[in-house]
Every structure is written in structure tokens, then in C-alpha cells.
Image (cartoon, helix red, strand yellow):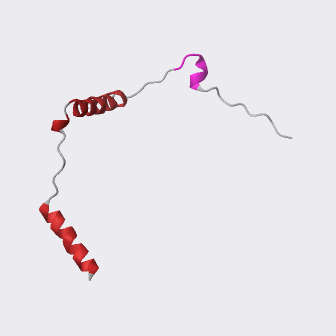
Amino acid sequence: MSAPTHTPPHPASRGGVDIRLPWWALVLPTIAFVVLLALILNPSDAHAASGDPLVTRLLERVQQLIAR
């Protein structure tokens, strides 16, 4: 025969919902939105990353060594 267990009430069951967000949960998405909006409005500011010649030569050398 099992005995009933009593669980304490949850803090959220007091009636009102009390959810608090940290400051960065609102600031970071806002900053990301503003940056993306600025890139859309002025796409000339969005520069493609230029490849480092050293990395390019290294990858070509690895490709040559694998092809042998």
C-alpha cells in the first residue's frame, strides 16, 4: 500500500508569472538586427574577406602532396 506524497507548490503557482530576462537577452539580438539592417541598406560596406596568400599556398601544397 503506497502512501500519498506531498509536493511543495511551485513558486510560479502564486498567481502571477514573474519572468525576468538578463539584459543581454534583449541587447544582443537588437545589435545583430541593427547590423544586418545596416548591411542591407548599404551593401557596399560589406566587404568579402580576402584570403591570406600564405593559407592559399599551403592548401595548394597539401593538394599537390595528396595528388601524388
Q: Is 56 or 10 nearer to us in this picture? A: 56
Considering only vertical position in the picture, is 49 above or below 6?
Answer: below
Q: Quadrant of residue 5?
A: top right
Q: Is residue 44 magenta?
A: no
What quarter of the picture does the C terminus occupy?
bottom left
Q: How many marks?
A: 0
Considering only vertical position in the picture, is 40 above or below 60?
Answer: above
Q: Quadrant of residue 30?
A: top left
Q: Residue furthest top?
A: 15
Image position, residue 40 (x, y; %): 25, 32
**Left-right relation of 13 to 4:** left
Image position, residue 50 (x, y; %): 15, 53
At x 17% / y 64%, what residue is drawn? 56
**Left-right relation of 57 to 33:** left
Image position, residue 51 (x, y; %): 17, 57
**Left-right relation of 1 to 33:** right
Magenta-highlighted residues: 11-17
Image position, residue 54 (x, y; %): 13, 64
Q: Residue furthest left?
A: 53
What quarter of the picture does the N terminus occupy?
top right
**Left-right relation of 14 to 63:** right
Q: Is 8 or 50 nearer to us in this picture? A: 50
Q: Quadrant of residue 46?
A: top left
At x 57% / y 24%, what residue is drawn? 11
Q: Is residue 15 magenta?
A: yes
Q: Residue furthest bottom?
A: 68
